[in-house]
Amino acid sequence: MVTETNESHLLIIEDDQGRKEFSLENTIYSLGRDRDCNIRLMSQFVSRRHATLVRMQRGDSNGYGSYYYRIVDGDAKGKPSANGLIINGRKMPVHNLKNEDEIVFGPQVRAIYYLLQNTQLSRQTDEVEYDITLINPGMNEDEDIED
């Protein structure tokens, strides 16, 4: 029997327009208030190109298909944002994201990163098993039973 792990990467943004969820699958994302950003942050306190998310391949041998995201302050050309990034309460220019990391971009603008892992066991046979419980529609506990 083989065990596979499927990972899902999720970024939940809270800004002036409420809460939005982004499923991360691309290799790079731009975050900021500019209209051209992949993930737009709605706040006057956020830079036009505030941060960049970059997908990184894991280095371990058993991490086939496994990756993580690195967040970098500023745009992809190296220009930093005005306010920087506060990650888990510390100001940081770069951080490899881990499950439930909190990123603060400015007042009332934040994100939480989730790494969701779904472990599945794949079968060696093609046989499909179902667990089915059959209920007779005439069997209702609320009905009066006549003797």
Image: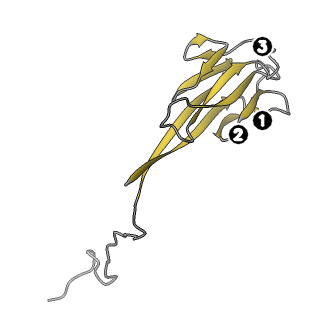
Residue 61 located left or right of residue 131: right
Quarter of image, res 134 = bottom left
Q: Nearer the viewer, mark 3 or mark 2?
A: 2
Outermost residue, front side: 61
- Residue at mark 1: 38
Disc 2 residue type? Asn
- Residue at mark 2: 26
Quarter of image, res 34 = top right
| Residue occupying the point 81% across, 32% down | 37
Quarter of image, res 142 = bottom left
Residue 139 located left or right of residue 16: left
- Residue count near mark 3 (Cα–Cα under 10 Å), binned few <14, some 14–19, many ≥20: some
| Residue occupying the point 72% across, 29% down | 16
- Residue at mark 3: 80
Disc 3 residue type? Pro
| Residue 103, above or below 25 | above
Image coords of residue 94 (percent x, y): 65, 16
Disc 1 residue type? Asn
Q: Nearer the viewer, residue 138 or 92?
A: 92
- Secondary element at tag 2: loop
| Residue 132, above or below 21 | below
Q: Kindly indicate whether the residue at mark 1 contacts the one at mark 2 (C-beta within 8 angstroms).
A: yes
Q: Report, in whole angstroms, how far the alpha carbon at label 1 lies from the one at label 3.
A: 17 Å
Q: Nearer the viewer, residue 86 or 119?
A: 119
Q: Quadrant of the C terminus?
A: bottom left
Q: Kindly indicate whether the residue at mark 2 contacts the one at mark 3 (C-beta within 8 angstroms).
A: no
| Residue occupying the point 79% across, 21% down | 75
Q: Report, in whole angstroms, how far the alpha carbon at label 3 lies from the one at label 2.
A: 22 Å
